[in-house]
Image (cartoon, coloured by chain):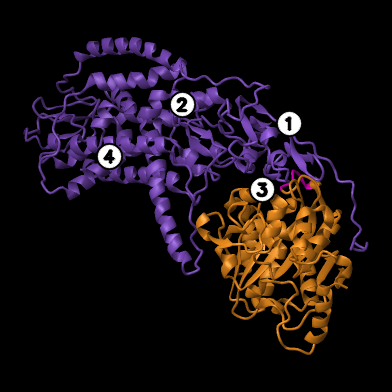
Chain colours: A orange, B purple
């Protein structure tokens, strides 16, 4: 048992009685932790499989205390899916629109004042938003779909713990929103090997080229240290095994009908990489992030709720 | 009499054409479906002729025939209704008159400048037969109106939109979004500004002088209007010689002294109909005996003139052949400087494209990715301002055929999405020594990430690293890799243009072996 583990367990025991905020150990993002729970939830991570994306989310979120644990009445929420590509949902390059829709519904049910949805896309943004089905899904559920295609939306910030990425232009909604929910899709990626929660954060910054230029893996970890999402929901319904992240045909996809939910971005990605079929240590950004203590990759020591539908 | 109402009809029709045409260039949010373009621009003369030559279909391009027939009946109605540049001049005249303090008599009879007008007509038309659009690009009224709209009006509209969007953003209102305009080039803007200033100055001071001394379409239709069935003329029996019609004529084609109208310069605006106190000017009944015409004798001189200029222009068109010819593609060339510029999908290749495009910049306005940019000298002098695919600014969206749907000339021919996805504009070139994976020893993959066909694929390199590998058989030359490549100062991956577009191979599709068992435990 290492020091962090000890502290965590002590906290968990006392938190049942205590009514004070229990912060995740090693978590330096307390400045942003508006949505953290009063009571430590017993599960570090929920993995679920066998159902439709929205149904799986209902089950998974309920098992870690429901959306009310993250979203308080009157708060603003950013839901950040992957909308990077101008392809239809069945091509599995963007987050499942049904999942995005259900997450937004949960946010409003928990009392959210406003929910914003955006992504800094790779293909032309209005086409990505419409063809992915996410624009429709988000608007139908009452969220505001916002552009991320203009530099004017981005504010220069310092990344205190960054090693290679020490400052960046971040979308202003990530800076101003009370709650930040990261909704990536699990895919193969030519440069990063696997893309999930941490890689999805490349859609909140303006200059992605800088990251590719200056050690992609380290800068992905650096960016994750800036504002860790309050919740990560990894869509693994369709998983692109080859030709990622855009894919060439539907034959690149494996229908895994799975989902991973965690407040710990490193744990979520570690589980996702395993699910994808790789060892987490083979993916450098995950290793860097664990070394920077952004979360835990030792899945065997985590309290995981595994659900099969 | 119903003739008095003609002017109102003319104004209404011209405003409609003007507004619709301008909107096509200003519609940066794609309110209108792109298929509207071909209906709105169907009657534009030069695009219609060029499209007819290229697609050889009356259904797709009979607009110019309609205009010719219209001219043979009623004279240059085109210049006062359909031509957006004509209406632009009318608007300039209208507003300058509104704001001018001294209301002196504005127009008077001008002598026809035959040397200029037939000269410009010859310069525009003859080189086209030799594949050079150089002069026509600079003189075609529709295309110049397009350049003005795309390079001057569009930025103004975008500026207003963005100002409003920034203001709303301060209140966390994201209903408008700023548009990042990337298609305005210095050359395009300077040329458009010069041209707009020229047209406005000429029209405000001398009416439709541009249309009657420079515009090749005006001159051509003027030649036709000599044979019009109905002609605007002065009724000698009613005319009292007050000269008010001459003063109202923006074409300067009514000569009160000789009481004649020069049909070749009359733009059929009908302004004179309403001002005449004795209804002494109007469409002459066709079989009525002709009034004295001063045209007949000049014909021979004109023919000689046209003959001589033709000979001169033939010499000039040799100039076009001296321009930069696209070099053919060489497999063994390594430098990251492009040898061959890229033309949009559907344009078949440089030869077809540059010899049909009049640089109206409509495709530039329609391209959502803004990859189409006005060229400088990429196609040589003769292709100045014609659009090219600029992969430093953006890349061609895989799922898009916008440019092929809007081109009124047939310089970019329609493609289905399936055809477009196999149309190879150029081939990918990878320069390993410039690649970040090699120089920095880190993973990158930005090029492969963006590649829609995986013609750029990441393969194992040293240690855990992977490096791009290219397969130019399935590459369609969309430029996504080149755009995304973060290497500096040289891109490590770029697209070398195909002088003639080729057909790419379909990417090989392999079925996944893996099967999923939903009852199986999680691997963690």
Q: Nearer the viewer, residue B232 or B352?
A: B352
- Compare marks 4 and 1 and give the one earlier in the sequence: 4
Which residue shows up at 80% across the image and 68% down it? A56
Q: Which of the labelled discs sits on residue B375, or is there none? A: none
Labels 2 & 1 near each other (Cβ < 8 A): no
The chain that hosts pointer 2 is: B
Labels 4 & 2 near each other (Cβ < 8 A): no
Picture coordinates of residue B290 (x, y %)?
Answer: 18, 22
Labels 3 & 4 near each other (Cβ < 8 A): no
Badge 4: residue crowd in 10 Å (few <14, some 14–19, many ≥20): many
- Report the label total: 4
Q: Nearer the viewer, residue B233 or B205?
A: B205
- Name the residue carrying label 3: A212
Picture coordinates of residue B500 (x, y %)?
Answer: 60, 24
Quarter occupied by residue B146: top left
Magenta stretch in the rendered image:
A246-250
- Compare marks 2 and 1 and give the one earlier in the sequence: 2
The chain that hosts pointer 3 is: A
Quarter occupied by residue B205: top left
Main secondary-structure element of the magenta-colored stretch: loop
Labels 4 & 1 near each other (Cβ < 8 A): no
Q: Are marks 3 and 4 on the same chain?
A: no
Q: CA distance from mark 4 to mark 2?
A: 27 Å
- Name the residue carrying label 1: B505
**Whether residue B113 is situated above or below residue A32 in the rendered picture:** above
Q: Nearer the viewer, mark 3 or mark 1?
A: 3
- Name the residue carrying label 4: B89
Picture coordinates of residue B135 (x, y %)?
Answer: 38, 24
Q: Nearer the viewer, mark 2 or mark 3?
A: 3
The chain that hosts pointer 4 is: B
Which residue shows up at 26% across the image and 31% down it? B210
* A72 falls in the magenta region: no
């Amino acid at each position: 048992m290492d020091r962090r583990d000890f502290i965590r367990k002590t906290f968990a025991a006392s938190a049942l009685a205590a009514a004070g905020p229990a912060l995740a150990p090693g978590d330096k993002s307390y400045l942003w932790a508006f949505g953290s729970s009063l009571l430590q939830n017993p599960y570090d991570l929920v993995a679920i499989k066998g159902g439709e994306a929205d149904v799986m989310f209902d089950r998974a979120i309920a098992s870690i205390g429901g959306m009310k644990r993250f979203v308080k009445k009157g708060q603003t929420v950013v839901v950040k899916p992957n909308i990077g590509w101008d392809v239809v949902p069945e091509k599995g390059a963007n987050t499942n629109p049904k999942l995005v829709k259900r997450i937004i519904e949960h946010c409003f049910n928990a009392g959210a004042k406003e929910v914003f949805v955006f992504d800094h896309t790779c293909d032309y943004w209005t086409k990505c938003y419409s063809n992915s089905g996410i624009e429709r899904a988000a608007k139908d559920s009452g969220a505001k779909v916002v552009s991320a295609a203009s530099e004017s939306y981005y504010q220069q910030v310092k990344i205190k713990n960054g090693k290679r990425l020490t400052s960046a232009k971040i979308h202003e909604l990530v800076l101003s929103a009370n709650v930040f929910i990261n909704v990536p899709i699990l895919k193969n990626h030519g440069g990063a090997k696997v893309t999930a929660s941490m890689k999805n954060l490349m859609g909140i910054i303006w200059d992605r080229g800088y990251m590719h230029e200056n050690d992609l893996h380290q800068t992905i970890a650096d960016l994750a240290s800036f504002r860790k999402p309050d919740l990560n929901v990894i869509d693994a319904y369709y998983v692109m095994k080859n030709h990622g992240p855009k894919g060439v045909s539907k034959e690149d996809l494996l229908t895994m009908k799975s989902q991973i939910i965690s407040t710990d971005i490193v744990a979520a990605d570690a589980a996702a990489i395993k699910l994808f079929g790789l060892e987490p240590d083979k993916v450098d950004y995950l290793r860097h992030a664990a070394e920077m203590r952004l979360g835990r990759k030792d899945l065997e020591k985590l309290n995981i709720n595994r659900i099969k539908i | 009499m119903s003739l008095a109402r003609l002017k109102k009809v003319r104004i209404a029709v011209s405003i409609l054409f003007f507004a619709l045409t301008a909107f096509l260039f200003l519609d940066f949010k794609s309110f209108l479906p792109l298929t509207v373009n071909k209906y709105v621009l169907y009657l534009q003369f030069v695009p219609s002729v060029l499209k007819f030559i290229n697609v050889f279909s009356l259904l797709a391009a009979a607009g110019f025939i309609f205009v010719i027939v219209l001219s043979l009946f009623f004279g240059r109605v085109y210049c006062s209704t359909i031509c957006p540049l004509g209406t632009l001049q009318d608007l300039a005249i209208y507003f300058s008159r509104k704001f001018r303090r001294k209301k002196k008599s504005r127009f008077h009879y001008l002598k026809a400048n035959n040397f200029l007008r037939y000269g410009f007509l010859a310069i525009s038309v003859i080189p086209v037969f030799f594949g050079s659009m150089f002069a026509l690009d600079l003189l075609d009224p529709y295309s110049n109106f397009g350049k003005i709209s795309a390079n001057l009006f569009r930025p103004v509209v975008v500026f207003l939109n963005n100002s409003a969007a920034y203001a709303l953003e301060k209140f966390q209102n994201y209903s408008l979004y700023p548009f990042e305009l990337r298609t305005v080039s210095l050359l395009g803007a300077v040329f458009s500004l010069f041209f707009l200033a020229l047209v406005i100055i000429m029209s405000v001071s001398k009416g439709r002088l541009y249309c009657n001394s420079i515009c090749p379409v005006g001159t051509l239709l003027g030649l036709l209007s000599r044979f019009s069935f109905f002609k605007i003329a002065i009724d000698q029996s009613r005319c009292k010689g007050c000269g008010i019609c001459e003063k109202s004529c923006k074409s300067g084609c009514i000569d009160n002294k000789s009481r004649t109208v020069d049909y070749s310069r009359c733009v059929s605006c009908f302004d004179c109909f309403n001002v005449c106190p004795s209804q002494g000017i109007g469409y002459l009944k066709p079989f009525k005996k002709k009034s004295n015409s001063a045209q007949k004798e000049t014909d021979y001189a004109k023919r000689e003139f046209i003959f001589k200029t033709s000979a001169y222009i033939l010499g000039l068109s040799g100039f076009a052949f001296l321009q930069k010819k696209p070099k053919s593609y060489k497999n063994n060339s390594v430098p990251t400087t492009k040898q061959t510029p890229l033309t949009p999908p559907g344009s078949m290749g440089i030869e077809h494209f540059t010899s049909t495009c009049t640089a109206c910049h409509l495709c530039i306005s329609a391209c959502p990715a803004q990859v189409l940019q006005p060229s400088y000298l990429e196609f040589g002098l003769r292709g100045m301002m014609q659009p090219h695919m600029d992969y430093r600014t953006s890349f061609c969206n895989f799922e898009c055929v916008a440019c092929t749907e809007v081109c009124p000339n047939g310089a970019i021919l329609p493609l289905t999405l399936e055809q477009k996805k196999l149309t190879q504009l150029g081939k990918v070139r990878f320069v390993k020594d410039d690649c970040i994976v090699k120089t920095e020893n880190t993973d990158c993959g930005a090029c492969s990430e963006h590649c829609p066909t995986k013609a750029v694929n990441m393969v194992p390199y040293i240690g855990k690293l992977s490096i791009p590998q290219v397969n130019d058989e399935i590459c369609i030359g969309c430029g996504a890799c080149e755009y995304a490549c973060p290497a500096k100062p040289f891109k490590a991956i770029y697209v070398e243009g195909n002088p003639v577009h080729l057909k790419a191979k379909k990417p090989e599709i392999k079925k996944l072996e893996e099967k999923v068992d939903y009852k199986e435990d999680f691997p963690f």
